[in-house]
Image: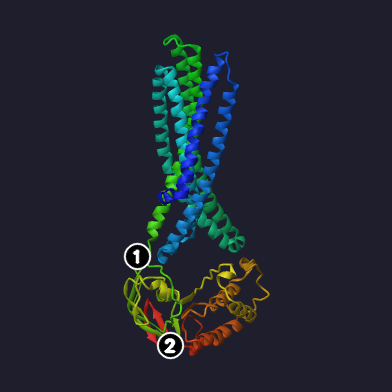
Amino acid sequence: MITNFIKNKKNLSLITVGISLGIISAILNSSIIPIINKTIFSSDINYTLIVFVFLLCILSKIISQKIMVKLSVLAIEDIRVWFSKVLYKSNVEEIEKKGNSKLLVNFKEDIYNISEGISAIPEAIISSITVISLCIYIFIISYKIFFISIISLLIIFIFMLIINKISEKYLIKERSSNIQLYSNIESYIKSIKMLKMSRQKKEYFNEKIFYKLFTEISSLTKKTNNFIFFSQAVSEIYIMILIIIVIIVSKSIFNHSLEVITGSIFCIIYITGTISNFSNILQTILRSKVSSKNLIDTSQELGLDGIKYNLIDSTKHISEIKLENICHKFKESEFNIGPINYQFISGNIYYIVGGNGSGKTTISKIISLLYKPTEGTILINNEIVNEDNTFYFRNHICLVEIECNIINRLDLYINTSEKKEKFNKLLKVFKLDEKIEIKSNIINNLSYLSSGQKKRLYLTLSILDDDKSVYIFDEWAAEQDPIFKEYFYSDILSYLKKKNKIIIIITHDDQYFKLADNTLKINYGKIEHVK
């Protein structure tokens, strides 16, 4: 992920230029101290040189920082694209298990932290070059003070690494708490009506869940920051002691000149500021390291679905789906699907009925090729479904789930004038023409629609694709008014049947069972009865 970002020629060029300018800025920045020190003890002052070095230092620093900001933005974009591709190619079951909250933390916090870490690495190099340059100057004017300084700096650096290692465990805990926070915020928003109508539940949620988690996150953040401040404070105190030692030793033991003493002190004071900045940089890199590990762990846990995402030939038609000894086992449950043996043929309407939790939705996801069965074979048009053709067949199937996840961009669904005309007609039929606000192909008021209205809109958008061969409706008619139920079962299904589609409906509406060509009753993951 990060390696690929750095290997990109354009990014590598930017990193090289940014670091090079940063190094030039660091060296020029460091050279100002010897120039100032020399100027103090010399009557011949070269103002032109001082101004030139100062301006060149500022210019190189500004350009370097601008490049680093650009790199940070590019890194966020690049990693987001990479992670979205990982999600697309991941196992659907694993994505559902992870949940929205963890994936949102990955997308928002982890990717941002990684980009900050990438831009902090050049800063760490520049800070190191600054310290090295100043140490070289100290060595030139007094190798004795240099050895005292270098030993002290090594002690400070090791101390900072130890502190950062200790604070790493708090960063990991803080991130874990943030995942819980996102999950609770999601629950809070979805349950806001219920909480408003129950003081007891609201107080329990706020005090026992929300506020407790806020306190936990604040405590972990405080501990992490305390370690950083402690590290900086100790480092600065240690540097002050070093300055006092240098003054005493230089004057009473080494008999150094005032120019050597002031030059050394100037360098040490400047190094103090650089070390303080270096401590913050190390913390940024540490956060980036934790986030990078979590992002990679998530991508590995999701697991690639192994499907080859090749070009699609949408001209072919699915005329038959055959399930042979299909079984699906859940890792964390004793409930299993199968074995199932059945054949779905085009031009027929199939009802799948059964109690809640009987396995109907899982079967629909197996038929739609979103779930891979643990055992058995799926044949489509007498061709065994495998990694080479799953993506092809999947693009001929339309799954309308009970949860309507609509993307508000209409141009994603409507790309021809015929589809637009059909869409406007269906909006009137489902009485949505006056409910939705469309501007520049974007539905602006999607969040204000009721669940029933969203389902009708979802159905409208789903049946626009005439190139689909299979339509699976999972409890679509639930929560719909009788007039819309009637239109769905009598008109929509009849229309799809005439188009020679395979129509599979998961439903509890027994008054419409007579419209089915075949009814499959599912019980405990098995076909109990076929009518």
What type is the residue that disc 2 sits on?
Asn
Give percent across and percent down for residue 73.
53, 49
Please say if 153 is above or below 410: above
Quarter of the image holding residue 352? bottom left
Kindly tell me whether residue 381 is visible in this rendering: yes
Label whose residue precedes the other's in the sequence (1 or 2)? 1
**Mark identifier at residue 518:** 2
Q: CA distance from mark 1 to mark 2?
A: 32 Å
Camera-side residue of 68 and 375: 68
Category of crowding for the residue at label 2, using alpha-carbon neighbours closer than 10 angstroms: few (below 14), some (14–19), many (at least 20) = some
Q: Is residue 252 left or right of residue 336?
A: right
Quarter of the image holding residue 367? bottom left
Give percent across and percent down for residue 505.
47, 81
Rendered-image quadrant of the C terminus? bottom left
Q: Please give the residue where the numbered disc 1 appears in the rendered image.
A: 331
Q: How is colour applied across the structure in the image?
A: rainbow
Camera-side residue of 158 and 508: 158
Give percent across and percent down for residue 98.
43, 60
Please say if 28 is above or below 11: above
Residue reaching furthest right?
434
What type is the residue that disc 1 sits on?
Lys
Tell me what residue is drawn at x 43 percent, y 86 percent.
346
Number of marks in picture: 2
Category of crowding for the residue at label 1, using alpha-carbon neighbours closer than 10 angstroms: few (below 14), some (14–19), many (at least 20) = few
Camera-side residue of 513 and 233: 233
Give percent across and percent down for residue 121.
45, 40
The local secondary structure at tag 2 comes to strand
